[in-house]
Amino acid sequence: MKNWKKYALASASVLALGATLAACGNLTGDNQKSSKSEDGKTVIKMYQIGDKPDNLDTLLENANKIIEEKAGVKLDIQYLGWGDYDKKMNVIISSGESYDIAFANNYVINAQKGAYADLTDLYKKEGKELYEALDPAYIKGNTVNGKIYAVPVAANVASSQNFAFNGPLLEKYGIDISNVTDYASLEPVLKAIKEKDPNVVPFAMNKSYGGPSDDFDYIAVDGLPFVVDLQGDTTKIVDRYTIPRYVENLKTLHKYYEAGYIPKD
């Protein structure tokens, strides 16, 4: 464990084909410094995005039984909220804080800055089976300046986009959601909830909301509008604001905002 570099789970690749594990080099800190547990085991520190699970301690306890046996190390996961993650990870990367794994923010940008360790050779040796199991597009999509800084996770290929509803609220007011298929068809449900319980804001949304979901692959970060439209010509990169269905969804959301279905802040 002499040369532990930092690794990061990236949310975007050049082709945006799913989440990826990206190696994170230390810009200013000592990337060979690893913390130790009470029993002398090397502790791998991981930053993850999202809310901390209630049973995280139990999960780690069980996971570490396997990890210690297989790799002789322990895993420690620290959670950072969705709204704070990018800002906090930028500070962590810039300060050279010692850590090992993280859900990568701004993968391409940070890779170009030298924030991630080069995994190219490691892939072909230690990660040979994983490398060969991946679709070549994942390798190409996560290659920056001829080097691979990420371990792609192919799970997003099989992902789906859905609306999540508050079950107890629907049951309380007898609201039917069987006809909801898109943003436009949400209106009767939102209207019914608002009329039956004026104190409830029907459409949960915060200030970091990036816009309506759609069948897009983002080539950089979600904050930039450059996408590959999976329902259109997948050989071109286009501005999402030129895609009619996306514009219509924006208009629909603005209509919901004016109707009080979306938080005013």
Image: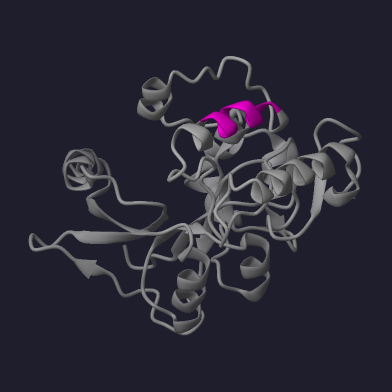
- Image quarter (top left, top right, bottom left or bottom right) of the C terminus: bottom right
- x, y percent for residue 192: 54, 29
- Please tell me which residue lies in front, 41 or 214: 214
User: What colour scheme does the image use?
Assistant: one colour
Residue 189 belongs to magenta span: yes
- Does 27 sit above or below residue 43? below
State left or right for residue 135 relative to residue 64. Answer: right
Tell me the residue at 69%/33% (across/down).
183
- Please tell me which residue lies in front, 141 or 81: 81
Residue 29 belongs to magenta span: no
The image quarter in which residue 42 lies: bottom left
Q: Report the magenta residues as a range.
A: 185-192
Res. 140 in view: no
The image quarter in which residue 264 lies: bottom right
- Please tell me which residue lies in front, 204 or 104: 204
Tell me the residue at 88%/42% (across/down).
243
State left or right for residue 163 relative to residue 135. Answer: left
- x, y percent for residue 15: 74, 46
- x, y percent for residue 47: 38, 60
Tell me the residue at 80%/42% (across/down).
246
- Does 93 sit above or below residue 226? below
State left or right for residue 193 relative to residue 4. Answer: right
The image quarter in which residue 233 lies: top right
- Image quarter (top left, top right, bottom left or bottom right) of the N terminus: bottom left
Residue that lies at the very extreme toward the top in this rendered image: 178
